[in-house]
Image: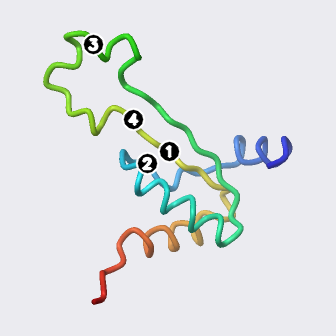
Amino acid sequence: MQLFDKLIIFFNKQDMYIGYSIEEVAKVINILKENNIKYAYKLMKHLRDRDMISFERVGMNMEYDAQYTISVKERDYEEAKYLVNKVLHEKNEN
């Protein structure tokens, strides 16, 4: 992705996925790539590396340590949201 495209997404973006599952993030990114929708993502870790062995993590569910946010251009938001909802909430038809 070129610098100009990254700047456009940065200033003209809308968050379309916020979650904690790396499996869901992989599905979201794959469906966006398949449909040529440019995206940006951000990872926010709640604990620093040095906190991993401290008492601050006592009682914390480690599945929620990392929060992922995926953003798309505003003009792509509706299509991206539709595709992502479809892929994340599809029923297993067996």
- Residue 18 badge: 2
Kind of element beneath mark 1: strand
Quarter placement of the C terminus: bottom left
Q: Amino acid at mark 4?
A: Ala
- Marks 2 and 3, how far apart at CA: 27 Å
- Residue 66 badge: 4
Kind of element beneath mark 4: strand
Decide which of 85, 77 is in the foreground and name it: 85
Q: Is residue 6 left or right of residue 72?
A: right
Decide which of 22, 77 is in the foreground and name it: 22
Query: Residue 14 in the image: x percent, y percent?
Result: 59, 51
Q: Earlier in the sequence, mark 2 or mark 3?
A: 2
Q: Amino acid at mark 3?
A: Ile
Q: Earlier in the sequence, mark 2 or mark 1?
A: 2
- Marks 3 and 4, how far apart at CA: 16 Å
- Marks 3 and 1, how far apart at CA: 26 Å
Is the C-beta separation of discs 1 and 4 under 8 Å? no
Q: Amino acid at mark 2?
A: Ile
Few, some or many C-alpha atoms within 10 Å of disc 3 (few <14, some 14-19, many ≥20)? few
Residue picked out by circle 1 = 69
Q: Amino acid at mark 1?
A: Thr
Q: Earlier in the sequence, mark 2 or mark 4?
A: 2
Is the C-beta separation of discs 3 and 4 under 8 Å? no
- Residue 31 badge: none
Residue picked out by circle 3 = 53
In the picture shown, does residue 93 fall above or below 44? below
> Which of label 3 and label 1 is nearer to you?
3
> Which of label 2 and label 4 is nearer to you?
4
Is the C-beta separation of discs 2 and 1 under 8 Å? yes
